[in-house]
Image: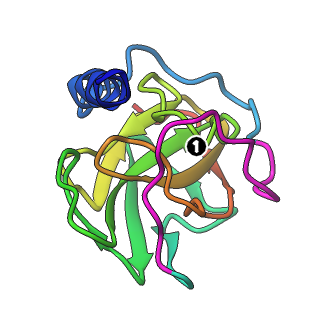
């Protein structure tokens, strides 16, 4: 019984946070760590990913200079996008990491200004960012917002938001 309660609680808290807009702007210029290897897992069950699957940015491209709000389009190959709570095999939903490193791969992805959830199954968004340099990275989460095993994350990209943007 104890083993069944933990995933249910994790799902309840994670889904409740899904779709919330960031409470504050991410710190400008705080760079994400390079995605060379995933942090150690902490113990929740992880959904398997498909070998060769990947997530990536369709736009913007690494090094782009943009205006705010920034239009972002997410790409996925080898798996499908499904809303949070939907445990369809070989699926997940996008999370946008802004100016932060990858989170603990064994826990649900945090929901805050630096970890934006798209639990509704969105594959694009517009997000307001302050002028300056920002690092973006994508991370796919399963129906409980836990990264897959192995995790699917994009290479980090750096974009520059022009001054004078709204």
Q: Residue furthest top?
A: 23
Image: magenta residue range: 33-50
Q: Main secondary structure of the magenta part?
A: loop
Q: Depth check: give the residue in front, 3 or 13.
A: 3
Closer to the camera, 67 or 19?
19
Q: Is residue 129 visible?
A: no
**Residue 140 vs residue 158: left or right?**
left
The picture places residue 43, in percent across and down from the top left corner, at 58, 35
Task: Indicate the quadrant where residue 118 lies.
Answer: top left
Q: Is residue 69 above or below residue 130?
A: below
> Is 102 situated left or right of 70 in this image?
right
Q: Residue at x 23, y 46 (%)?
A: 84
* Residue 34 percent coordinates (x, y): 80, 52
Q: Looking at the image, is 122 positioned above or below residue 164? A: below
Q: Which residue is mark 1?
A: 161
Position of 16 relative to 117 (above/below): above
Q: The N terminus appears in which quarter of the rendering?
A: top left
* Residue farthest front in this picture: 1
Give the image location of residue 37, x and y in percent.
79, 56
Is residue 75 in the magenta section? no
- Taking the spot 32% from the left edge, 41% from the top edge, the residue there is 144
Residue lying at 45% horizontally and 15% vertically, measured from the top left: 24
Callout 1: 10 Å neighbours few (<14), some, many (20+)?
A: many
């Amino acid at each position: 019984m104890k083993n069944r309660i933990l995933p249910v609680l994790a799902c309840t808290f994670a889904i409740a946070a899904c779709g919330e807009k960031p409470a504050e702007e991410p710190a400008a210029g705080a760079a994400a760590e390079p995605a060379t290897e995933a942090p150690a897992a902490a113990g929740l069950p992880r959904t398997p990913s498909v070998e060769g699957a990947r997530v990536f940015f369709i736009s913007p491209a690494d090094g782009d200079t943009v205006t705010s709000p920034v239009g972002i389009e997410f790409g996925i190959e080898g798996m499908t996008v499904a809303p949070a709570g939907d445990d369809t095999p070989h699926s997940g939903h996008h999370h946008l990491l802004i100016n932060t490193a990858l989170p603990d791969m064994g826990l649900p992805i945090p929901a805050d200004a630096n970890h934006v959830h798209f639990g509704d199954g969105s594959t694009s968004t517009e997000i307001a960012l302050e002028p300056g340099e920002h690092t973006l990275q994508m991370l796919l989460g399963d129906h409980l917002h836990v990264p897959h095993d192995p995790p699917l994350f994009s290479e980090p990209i750096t974009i520059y938001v022009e001054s004078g943007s709204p």
